[in-house]
Image (cartoon, grey):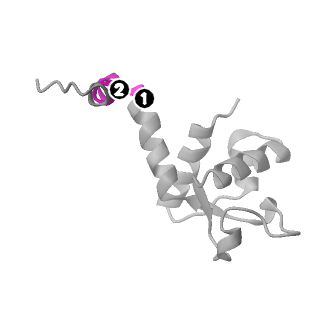
Amino acid sequence: MVVQEEVLRFVADRSDRGRLVSFVDLISEFNLDPGSAVDHLERAWRDRLIQTASDRRPRFRYRLEPGEAVRRLSFRISHRGRERLAWYQSMRDPRQGELFESRASGKVDHS
């Protein structure tokens, strides 16, 4: 099963190399069926973790225009997507997790 973090990492890596990502790229990289690839892109786009490469009218910046299909769009990672990847990383790194917990409780370990 492909998880959001893997998809975001893939989009970020390609974005860092100046390349865009389409649903065909997700199919090839993760061996997904077309519907699953579109679903991954739609969710990440709706959550503003990725953005389209083309300029869009403000109303349709994060959703499809009538008659438009995700299959015809190309995406890159957004600032919010990079923040989410950093959050995933902090959840894997126990030291980072302790830092977040101590800040939330108001107790900071200065050792």
Query: Under tag 1, what secondary structure?
Result: helix
Q: Is residue 72 magenta?
A: no
Residue 51 drawn above or below residue 58: above
Residue 33 drawn above or below residue 56: above
Q: Which residue, given by chain and number where applicable, does mark 1 sit on?
A: 91
Our reading of the magenta stretch's main secondary structure is helix
Left or right, residue 86 beside residue 106: right
Name which residue type carries label 2: Gly
In the figure, residue 69 lies in which quadrant?
A: bottom right
Is the C-beta separation of discs 1 and 2 under 8 Å? yes
Left or right, residue 18 beside residue 68: left
Q: CA distance from mark 1 to mark 2?
A: 6 Å
Residue at position x 57%, y 52% in the image: 49
Q: Which residue, given by chain and number where applicable, does mark 2 sit on?
A: 97
Magenta-highlighted residues: 92-101
> Looking at the figure, which quarter contains the C terminus?
top left
Left or right, residue 75 beside residue 18: right
